[in-house]
Image (cartoon, rainbow, N blue to C red):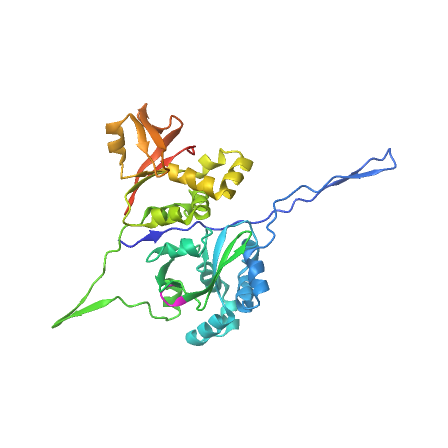
């Protein structure tokens, strides 16, 4: 089965709040209210493209497609940004001019959105998706592969500069324009051929069945879905010790993960959550506390409950598991609201609260 990942649709637009001024006719003073404080994005992914100086065609395309306001929004986004040289090569290969493509805003929009992922993924997270098909905001999938330490998109477009960070996402520079399969077909570009294996006296077409996605890949998938889940969990995994992501990405592992939803993280006071995310050691310990060695399906847990001490990857720490009114409850505080999300290296149970070591 091919590893596939859906990505959230990105539509995040600023709203400007204008302060009102009021005056009192009976007094010789004028009182002006302070502007309402608005959460602004200081440096956007679009700002990075403008400042870099090698994306003039990309910027012109974004303007022509009317996507500038979107990419200046809150995000988060991951943008695969083709250089000017990449666009020039694409125009030559397709036999069209820049003017012709910019005039076809429908096709242009599809191509641009195919270069955008609806979640922030740094190069480490992208590399962890090696061999995976990842859905873009446009809706069709890109193929991520890693060859000798270099990330490739659709096998031909190389990430030549990674992790250009903005306040609303991240930019990875690529050296070729990538086309959605439907657009490639419409433009007469040949689709990739199937791999064939030649055997003496006969030729057969073989399709290797890819492995099931790992726990890390599933978290990326769900964090990028529509509606999105686990965006905070994904951000936490990326901010924690790299060993956490490595463990969740290792197909040789056998793990059970109790995964808090975004709503579970949102229940933590904002300043406390910000402090946790900024403290790598504390964050790593909390995440490891949500992972148990071994694979425990829901039926196994229910059959064995109550479990007073379920070991976790956080050394010396255990979880208590019990069944209350038919629901599995962890540490008397977190309820499993979705069970048995299967992965190649374990299972995920979705919980409605963050567990505290």
Q: Is residue 222 highlighted in magenta?
A: no
- 325 horizontally vs 93: left or right: left
- 185 horizontally vs 1: left or right: right
Asked whether 241 or 90 is in front, the reply is 241
* Residue in the image at 53% along x and 40% along y: 274
Asked whether 326 or 252 is in front, the reply is 252
Q: Residue furthest left?
A: 201
Q: Residue furthest top?
A: 325
* Residue in the image at 50% along x and 63% along y: 105
Whether residue 189 can be seen here: yes
Counting the numbered discs, the total is 0
Q: Is residue 154 highlighted in magenta?
A: yes
* Residue in the image at 50% along x and 72% along y: 100
Image location (x, y in percent) of residue 40: 61, 48
Asked whether 304 or 47 is in front, the reply is 304
Quadrant (top left/top right/bottom left/bottom right) for the C terminus: top left
Image location (x, y in percent) of residue 239: 46, 47
- 32 horizontally vs 256: left or right: right
Asked whether 101 or 142 is in front, the reply is 142
The magenta stretch is 153-157
Q: Residue furthest front?
A: 316
Image location (x, y in percent) of residue 149: 38, 62
Type of secondary structure dominating the magenta stretch: loop
């Amino acid at each position: 089965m091919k590893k596939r990942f859906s990505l959230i649709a990105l539509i995040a637009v600023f709203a400007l709040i204008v302060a009102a001024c009021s005056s009192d006719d009976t007094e010789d003073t004028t009182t002006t209210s302070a502007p309402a404080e608005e959460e602004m994005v200081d440096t956007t992914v679009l700002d990075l493209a403008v400042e870099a100086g090698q994306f003039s065609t990309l910027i012109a395309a974004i303007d022509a497609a009317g996507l500038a306001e979107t990419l200046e929004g809150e995000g988060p986004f991951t943008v695969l940004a083709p250089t000017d040289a990449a666009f020039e090569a694409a125009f030559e290969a397709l036999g069209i001019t820049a003017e012709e493509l910019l005039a076809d805003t429908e096709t242009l929009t599809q191509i641009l959105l195919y270069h955008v992922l609806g979640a922030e993924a740094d190069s480490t997270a992208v590399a962890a998706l090696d061999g995976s098909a990842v859905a873009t905001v446009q809706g069709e999938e890109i193929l991520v592969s890693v060859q000798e330490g270099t990330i490739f998109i659709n096998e031909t477009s190389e990430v030549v500069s990674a992790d250009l960070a903005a306040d609303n996402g991240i930019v990875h520079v690529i050296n070729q324009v990538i086309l959605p399969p439907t657009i490639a077909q419409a433009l007469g570009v040949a689709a990739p051929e199937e791999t064939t294996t030649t055997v003496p006296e006969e030729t057969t077409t073989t399709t290797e069945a890819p492995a099931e996605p790992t726990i890390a890949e599933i978290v990326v998938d769900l964090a990028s879905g529509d509606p999105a889940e686990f965006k905070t969990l994904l951000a936490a995994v990326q901010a924690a010790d790299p060993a956490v992501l490595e463990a969740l990405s290792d197909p040789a592992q056998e793990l059970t993960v109790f995964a808090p939803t975004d709503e579970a993280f949102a229940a933590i006071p904002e300043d406390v959550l910000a402090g946790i995310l900024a403290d790598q050691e504390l964050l790593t310990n909390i995440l490891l506390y949500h992972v148990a060695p071994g694979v425990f399906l829901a039926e196994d847990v229910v059959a064995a409950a109550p479990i007073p001490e379920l070991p976790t990857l956080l050394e010396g720490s255990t979880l208590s598991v019990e069944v209350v009114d038919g629901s599995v409850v962890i540490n008397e505080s977190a309820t499993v609201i979705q069970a048995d999300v299967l992965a190649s290296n374990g299972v995920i149970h979705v919980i409605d609260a963050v567990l505290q070591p």
